Image (tube, rainbow, N blue to C red):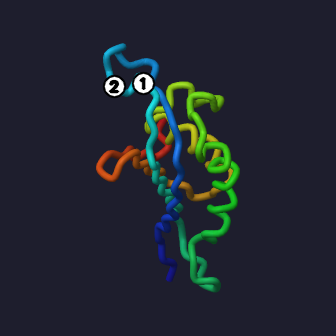
Amino acid sequence: MLMRCRIIKDFRFEAAQTLPNLPGDHKCTQMHGHSFKVEIAIEGEVDPHIGWVYDHAEISKAMKPLLDRMDHAYLNEIEGLENPTIENMAAWLWKKLSPQLPGLCEIVIYETPTARCVFRGEF
């Protein structure tokens, strides 16, 4: 009997940003930073022999170059993140990760402990 599960791997990075498309008097048009948390979720059938859906190490391997680029960076300078809202960041990550991570089903990005975006690959 096959079992389906979702596994989630968390990552953290620090970065600065401005949100240039907001009205000029909005505080987020000024440079500011966040301690971001990213959750990468993979869903699929549990391999009955190995006993897991996917190797967490493979998720880390796929995320490493992206985290290396984003951590302690000014996000607006990264190609594709010129307007680095958490929504745009989630879509950017999805485009980079989905070819490498079969079963990718959800990316959650927290910009604060109480504010986050959930993206499920719907463009």
Alpha-carbon neighbours of circle 1 within 10 Å: few (<14), some, or many (≥20)? few
Residue behind mark 2: 27
Q: Mark 1 falls on what kind of element? A: loop
Q: Is 20 displayed left or right of 65 in the figure?
A: left
Residue occupying the point 33% across, 25% down: 27
Taking depth in this image into account, of 10 and 118 the one nearest to the observer is: 10
Q: Amino acid at mark 1?
A: Gln
* Residue 51 percent coordinates (x, y): 58, 83
Q: CA distance from mark 2 to mark 1?
A: 6 Å
Compared to 11, does 112 lie above or below?
A: above
Indicate the position of residue 104 as horizontal and vertical percent values.
55, 55
**Relative image position of residue 78 (x, y in whole percent):** 63, 32
Which residue is drawn at the image coordinates 65% and 69% (left, top)? 57
Q: Could you say which quadrant of the image residue 25 lies in?
A: top left
Depth check: 2 or 73 in front? 73
Instruction: Tell whether 99 sits left or right of 107.
Output: right
